[in-house]
Image: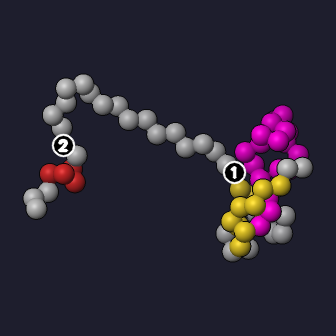
Amino acid sequence: MDDREIRCVICDAEMPFEVPPCKDGHDKDCPELVCTRCGAAEILAPLEIRVWLRPNSDRIAPLQRRAA
């Protein structure tokens, strides 16, 4: 099993996390991890942010509209 050290919120410390046996067939690339001390589960998932901008837009962000 693959061990990674991640901050465990239950243990309140850097703890080794291991990949449990994955039923989905991810093997070592499984996004699910388990704390070896308390058994807390952690899911690592990539965060994807998409921003759509219109070409030639004159829009100003709300924070930029404030007067000085």
Q: Position of residue 58 (x, y in %)?
A: 15, 34
At mark 1, the secondary structure is: strand
> Identity of the amino acid at label 1?
Ile
Span colored in magenta: 15-34
On the picture, is 2 further left or further right than 5?
right
Q: Which residue is mark 2?
A: 60
Q: Measured along the vertical axis of the image, is residue 18 above or below residue 8?
A: above
Q: Measured along the vertical axis of the image, is residue 61 above or below residue 56?
A: below
In terms of image quadrants, where is residue 45?
A: top right
Q: Is residue 25 magenta?
A: yes
| Mark 2 crowdedness (10 Å alpha carbons): few <14, some 14-19, many ≥20 | few
> Identity of the amino acid at label 2?
Ile
Instruction: Tell me what residue is drawn at x 67 percent, y 69 percent.
Output: 9
Q: Which residue is mark 1?
A: 43
Q: Measured along the vertical axis of the image, is residue 54 above or below residue 20?
A: above
On the picture, is 38 further left or further right than 54?
right
Image quadrant where one finds the C terminus: bottom left
Q: Is residue 64 magenta?
A: no
On the picture, is 11 further left or further right than 61?
right
